[in-house]
Image (tube, grey):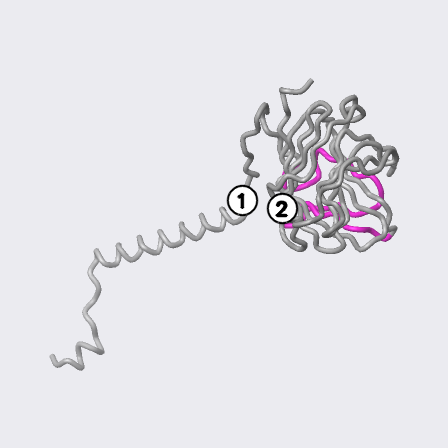
Amino acid sequence: MDDRHEALHPPPASRGGRIAGVAFVGVLLAGAALWAAMGDRQEEPVSRPVAGGGEPIVLFNGRDLTGWTVHGTERWYVENGELVSESGPDAEYGYLRTDETFTDFDLTAEFMQEADGNSGLFFRSTIDGTRITGWQAEVAPPGLHTGGIYESYGRGWLARPDPTNEPLSMGQWNQLRLRVDGDRVSTWLNDVPRVELRDAGIGAATGHIALQIHDGGGIRVRWRNLVLTPLTSGR
């Protein structure tokens, strides 16, 4: 037998080689299935320890609006595991309110402003239709006081952050942290302290958490990883 015959007619593979090949293909298929399952899995937000805090509560489940109530005609929906707030045809104020009420807590929320980005995170609030009473940690375009505290239908601005070196990135994910403990309120934007105040009106109140869409139209803001830790150190 010459070399040409061997090249055209290689010797048959051994039985052990065939078994090893089948096993290898099985491992590849199992790995692909596991990778696909991991891609479809909704990851839980990672919470950090909070001084004086209890068990963290995930406010948004990444799938639907369970635990929330819509106020107004603006659009609230889930896309790719994220909560999207978007101006509707009426271009009016709109709110998404928690069904539960919260008083003393430490809350973190991530947001991305894809358009105008004028929104807000309300606390100790009540809503009648689209008229809200309570206080807002501002979420706004650059230079418009994100992290400041505003009282709706009341005294207006209670605290505005220093506008210099604002750590806000339009079109990217940012993290807002809000701590409300008795009459004390503190905010951080991307781990940078923004405002801190004490207020008797806030201290006497309780109510819901709510996300806002400002009026005027053209607003689109994404939210994710809304985690609230109840505080046991307050009243």
Total numbered labels placed on residues in the image? 2
The reply to whether discs 1 and 2 touch (Cβ–Cβ < 8 Å) is no
Q: What are the residue bounds of the magenta stretch?
A: 60-89
Circle 2 crowding by C-alpha within 10 Å: few under 14, some 14–19, many from 20 = some
* Membership of 82 in magenta stretch: yes
Is the residue marked by circle 1 packed among few (<14), some (14-19), or many (20+) residues within 10 Å?
few
- The answer to if 203 sits in the magenta stretch is no
Mark 1, residue position: 41
- Answer with the quarter of the image where residue 204 lies: top right
Quarter of the image with the N terminus in it? bottom left
Give x and y (percent) for residue 69: 77, 36
Q: Which element type, helix, strand or loop, lies under badge 1?
A: loop
SS type, badge 2: loop
Q: Which residue is drawn at 79% across and 23% down?
A: 200
In front of the other: label 1 or label 2?
Answer: 2
Q: Is residue 58 left or right of residue 125?
A: left
In the rendered image of this protein, does residue 108 appear above or below residue 29? Answer: above
165 to 57, vertically: above or below: below
Residue 109 x, y percent position in the rendering: 65, 40
Mark 2: which amino acid? Gly
Along the line of sight, the residue nearer the viewer: 17 or 117: 117
Q: Residue at (71%, 48%) from the top-left corner? A: 163
The Cα atoms of the two marked residues, 1 and 2, are separated by 10 Å
Task: Return the x and y of residue 203 as percentages of the image width and height.
Answer: 76, 23
Q: Earlier in the sequence, mark 1 or mark 2?
A: 1
Amino acid type of disc 1?
Arg
Of residue 5 and residue 95, the one placed in the foreground of this image is: 95
Residue 81 - label: 2
